[in-house]
Image: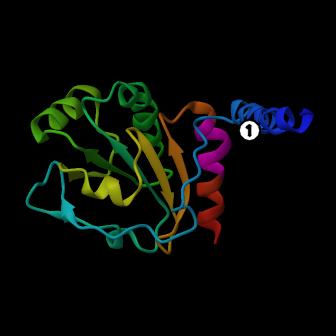
Amino acid sequence: MKAKFLVPLALFGVLLGFLAIGLQRDPHEVPSPLVNKSAPAFKVSQLIAADQQFSPADLKGKVWMLNVWASWCVACRVEHPLLVELSQSRVVPVIGLDYKDKRADALQFLGKNGDPYNLSAFDSDGRVGIDYGVYGVPETFVIDKSGVIRHKQIGPITREALQNTILPLINELNKS
């Protein structure tokens, strides 16, 4: 009779253990299956120069960042001043990927808030974002000289993440 109660009690204990482990994890650190894999290839029109195309192959041989953003994204507005500051330092090429947006709205956003991007690719239907495993905007990828994703930042870039993780990684990747 006691064994009948021990099985549900043991299962409850295991579930409690999983819950305790899950509560100790940072929700911004969602592992990406793309880290240390080649960045997905794509070719889409540029946001500003709509008659020109952009592909990650255009940056082969350079360390660069891909920042997925949208004019309708509130968190993108939070990180935008930091991206403008980063672009002025010219430490790394920053490519924007305007995600599921209207071209006119995106152009207005950049005109009003400044354009931190070397260029922005225009992903109106979100297909590129899907290939990159984008959960939501903003997300940022650091891509090495051979086109391999080395880091994925989910959510807005903070000064702390930039100084403690992203810039040291970029410096290291530029050495190799």
| Residue type, numbered disc 1 | Phe
Q: Nearer the viewer, residue 49 or 34?
A: 34
Please tell me whether residue 91 belongs to the stretch shown in magenta.
Answer: no
Could you say which quadrant of the image residue 170 lies in?
A: bottom right
Q: Main secondary structure of the magenta part?
A: helix
Quadrant for the N terminus in the image = top right
Front position in the image: 60 or 124: 124
User: On the image, which quarter does residue 162 sit in?
Assistant: top right
> How was this image coloured?
rainbow
Indicate whether 71 appears above or below 125.
Answer: above
Residue at point 66% right, 51% down? 168
In magenta segment, residue 162: yes
32 with respect to 114 (left or right): right
Q: At x 48% / y 36%, what residue is drawn?
A: 155
The image position of residue 93, as x and y in percent, is 41, 55
Magenta-drawn segment: 161-168
Quick check: 5 left or right of 47? Answer: right
Residue 96, horizontal then vertical, whole percent: 32, 48
Q: Position of residue 99 (x, y in %)?
A: 26, 45
| Residue at the limit of the structure toward the front, as seen here | 1
Q: Which residue is mark 1?
A: 18
Location of the C terminus by quadrant is bottom right
